[in-house]
Image (cartoon, grey):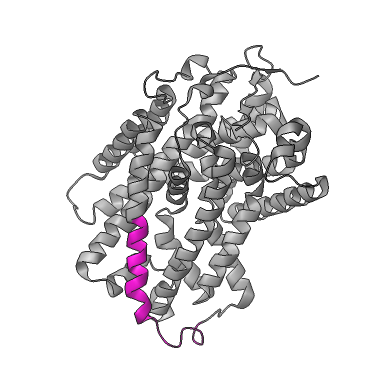
Amino acid sequence: MAEERRNGSGATSELKRVLTFKDLLFTCVGGIIGSGIMSIMGITIGMTGRSVPISMFFAAVFVLLGITPIIIITGTVRIRGGQYTIVGMLAGKRMSGLFIIIDVATNISLSMYALSFADYFLAFFPDVPRRLVAAAVLTFFWILNMLGIDKMAKLQNLIVFVLMLALALFAVYGLPNVSPDYLTEDFAPNGFTGMITAAALLYFATSGGQLIAGLSGEAKNPTRDIPRAIIISTFSVAVLYAVVAVVAAGVLPVDQVANKPLTDVARTVLPTPLYVFFMVGGAMFAIVSTLNAQLACAPKALLQACSDGWFPKKMAYIHPKYKTPMVLLTFYYLVGMLLIIFGFDIGLVANLTVCLSQINFIIISWNLVKLPGLIPELWEKSSFRMSPGALKIWSRVAVCVGFIQLWLLARDLSVPMLIGNVCYFIFALIFSKVRSKSPDVNIEVSYEAN
């Protein structure tokens, strides 16, 4: 039976198309640089010693190979519902239902960022209640995003500028103190295997660029700007991380920094005022830049899913003045607040779906080969147009990268967490199968020319 599709405007067509290349680039950088790098850097030094910068290069290459399908698709067509639109376009109705159930679960990590910010904040003000700080920062960015995507972008640009400045100061003050025997002592003690293992971990510290696919409906020129923003931000952050890694691994003996947070080295190389600036502008701003970016991007897939009938269509409300999905922003905000207030184990919640987001990427990557046949006229005009054979190679390479990352994620989970992922996946399958039979669910054509 042919897939049911309908042409129509839908709520996502009402979004304000105001984001420039700079806005997308800074949002992308903010989405990539998170608080994780503060701890992951030390862990990777423990894996591969002072060869971490090489691992960072491999990580950036792996990331771009893995998200090439997103780059190709967003460079060809405007996708108003982000990756949900991609899945519906390439894989059909049921897979779009599967995608949205997984996507909603993966985005409840918003409260995790708010609590991480609170942990750093308490280092300066230990008497303030942790949950109060987390609730306050989540509320602030919820209100900011309610007031319009342009307001979100302006503050994001400022946050990311300060964040990059903080990391640059760490590098500038640290590089003159790097040991002269950097390349001869503790360099790749575990050989190539150690470097690749570290690169696999660093993959997750550099793979956040794809989230701006969710802003395609609000970009002025998405097919030109989104691919450029993803590629430039991924390599730029990788270069910055590599320089930071030289300082992190090269100033003190490796055994003193292995498996230690980046803040320990910062305390050594930076004067006290700049160390405070690094903690605020580096560690804390890294968290809120990711929180702000995710809060802006997360509702767009759900917005289109509501228009398509998977959930009540009233939830796809767009404020007439601010052009923001207020109901869905509030939904994610309230879920985050409940998790904060009632003290749920956010790590547990995140691990319950940690493998499933990778499955979504594999679905997109495998079905990439269908793109030219679905939108032949737009494909002919695409900057990424290539032969069917070349497209299939890119598709299968991305699938392989996806399965490797899925395996790496799965092997680090406990048996109960693996079972939790499988159970949630089964629930998503059942939901998509049952709900797709409803006459209320009709997949709208939510992709269009630039």
**Quarter of image, res 274:** bottom left
The single residue placed furthest to the front in the displayed view is 381
Q: Please provide percent x and percent y for residue 296.
A: 43, 36
Q: Quadrant location of the N terminus? A: top right
**Quarter of image, res 10:** top right
The residue segment tinted magenta is 163-186
Left/right placement of residue 315 relative to residue 57 reads left
Q: Main secondary structure of the magenta part?
A: helix
Compare residues 374 and 350 and report the one nearer the observer. 374
- Can residue 271 be seen in the rendering of this structure? yes
Compare residues 86 and 405 and report the one nearer the observer. 86
Question: Residue 262 lies in magenta, yes or no?
Answer: no
Residue under the point 74% across and 32% down: 377
Residue under the point 52% across and 33% down: 104
Residue under the point 40% across and 74% down: 247
Compare residues 287 and 412 and report the one nearer the observer. 287
**Quarter of image, res 332:** top left
Residue under the point 29% across and 40% down: 137
Left/right placement of residue 89 relative to residue 158 reads right
Q: Quadrant location of the C terminus? A: top right
Q: Is residue 404 above or below residue 328?
A: below
Q: Please provide percent x and percent y for residue 126.
A: 19, 53
